[in-house]
Amino acid sequence: MSGRVYVARSARVAARKLGEEMLVMSAVDSTLFTLNPTATILWEAVDGATLLDEIVNSKICSEFEVNGEEALRDAEMLAKDLAKHGILLISDQPITPANSRVPERV
Amino acid sequence: MSALLQEMSDRALALGVPFSVQVDLTYRCNEKCIHCYLDHDDHGEMTTAEIKFLLKEMAEAGVFILTLSGGEVFLRRDFFEILEYARELTFCVKLKTNAVLIREEQAARLRELAVQSIQVSIYSHRPEVHDAITKVPGSLRRSINAIRFLKSQNLKVIMANVLMTANREDIHGVRALADELGVECTLDPTVTPMMDGDRSVLTLNAGESALRQIFRDEAFIGNAEEFCAPPPPPTPDSMDSLPCSAGHTACYVSPYGEFYPCVQFPLSCGNVRRQRFIDIWRNSEQLKEVRSIRLRDLTSCSKCAHGSTCTRCPGLAFLEGNMRGPSIADCEKSYARTGIPSANLLAKTETAAPRRLVQIQLVPAITGSRFDGIGAGAQ
Ligand code: SF4
Ligand code: SF4
């Protein structure tokens, strides 16, 4: 990945912010995740329409004063990891509800 | 509950967040179960708009687990509209239903909407027993068909049974049926009073000997020796422990908007038709009182041998007249489990007529047979 990707939340999750952390449950297999405050910011910002590197620049780098490249690498790793569990979707095209279906069983 | 979910629930407690809420969408039902605790007439259910407004407020308050129940939820024509909205708000949605109205189409829709689990009431594997309890001929066949439809959609199904005299011979049959269908199975060992406090349904309870049998049946309770072991003496920590989640991380809203600490704890704390959900959660005097209860403040239970291990339900205690008092159903369960009478039952025996006092000699067989009498006398 090069940050030139679009990321969206799957519709097949339950999610709620608890304090600074996000609690996410996959409806696919009921796996539960907690996202740390940085990952939570990313989770809340991804909309399927904004490129990941733009989100990292505007929401993470400015907020946490971290190096852009490093932050992008971390964000990509996180996105890939969550995509593996079906709770985030990654595409090189903008993601709309029509093309956002994920497999229901992994 | 998984360790992580428990950790999140603990965090919700620390943050004062209502983590899990049950909303009953209707009390109307297409079954007329003999043990049901509800009045099935419609006294003015919340409208679709009112329920959606409530769900929005609940999401903002931080509610994660939303249990939709009834009555029978599928009797609401707007059920899928409500469910769709709940999922838009990213609740983890659990359903409780008799499933009689679920066909392929409804099951597919539930899968699309990513419902977390569906609890279906099944009281026997035999139609003549189940249908006699629901008073609806053909209901077992329809509920089982529905479970098959739900399973074919890879949905998580839990069969929920309630132990009564009418079905006490069938608990293993229900479990075998659950295994055959590939679903989980739970068994509630006691019938609870009606929400208005009417205790007549308690006569349906299977009684102490059935409880004793189940509490020694490893298919239901795991390690019987551990489960039935005499309780350890209460520690300072257990004296300060919370009775349960009701009012702490969980609450209940009725179809009429009444806000209670739990579905089994009908202490009105407010009404979401007149007040904001979060205002009731934060400011209700009744909830504050519920939250203040600790084991050490309970007159009988703090002196009871079972204090540290008892599952005392404050809701049932409230229905018996005092939320800080013991709950007879739990006293009976503690006794059936361990053979050790509770402080409450001993006290009742001491204050009972002299003939009764003579009867309670601590010989298990004799104390066992007296229990029903003591329970009934207190009702
Ligand atoms: S113990 Fe009683 S009041 Fe508490 S959560 Fe359970 S049913 Fe509700
Ligand atoms: S057994 Fe009865 S008296 Fe003892 S702690 Fe439980 S509810 Fe209270």
Image: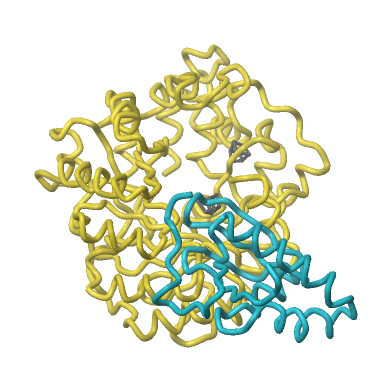
Q: Position of residue B343 (x, y in %)?
A: 63, 34
Residue in the image at 60% along x and 32% along y: B342
Q: Quadrant of ligand 2?
A: top right
Whether residue B267 is visible to the viewer of this picture, yes or no, is no
Q: Quadrant of the C terminus of chain B?
A: top left
Q: Nearer the viewer, residue A47 or B233?
A: A47
- Pick the residue in front: B325 or B45: B45
Question: What is the quadrant of residue B277 in the picture?
Answer: bottom right
Q: Nearer the viewer, residue B341 or B155?
A: B155
Give the left or right position of residue B73, taking residue B315 as reference: left
The image quarter containing residue A8 is bottom right
Left or right: B377, with A64 as reference point: left
Q: Is residue A35 visible?
A: yes
Rendering quarter of residue A63: bottom right
Q: Chain A, which colour?
A: cyan
For chain B, give the colour.
yellow
Lateral position of residue B335 relative to residue B162, left or right: right
Residue at the spot 55% in from the left edge and 48% down from the top edge: B313
Residue sticking out furthest to the left: B137
Q: Position of residue A87 (x, y in %)?
A: 56, 62
Residue B353, percent across and down? 49, 30
Q: Give the percent coordinates (x, y) of residue B136.
A: 13, 48
- Identified at 66% across, 71% down, the residue is A17
Q: In this figure, which colouring scheme has been used for the structure?
A: by chain
What residue is drawn where x is 29% and y is 63%?
A: B109
Q: Is residue B341 above or below residue A29?
A: above
Please determine whether, in this image, residue B62 is positioned above or below residue B266.
below
Q: Is residue A69 left or right of residue B152?
A: right
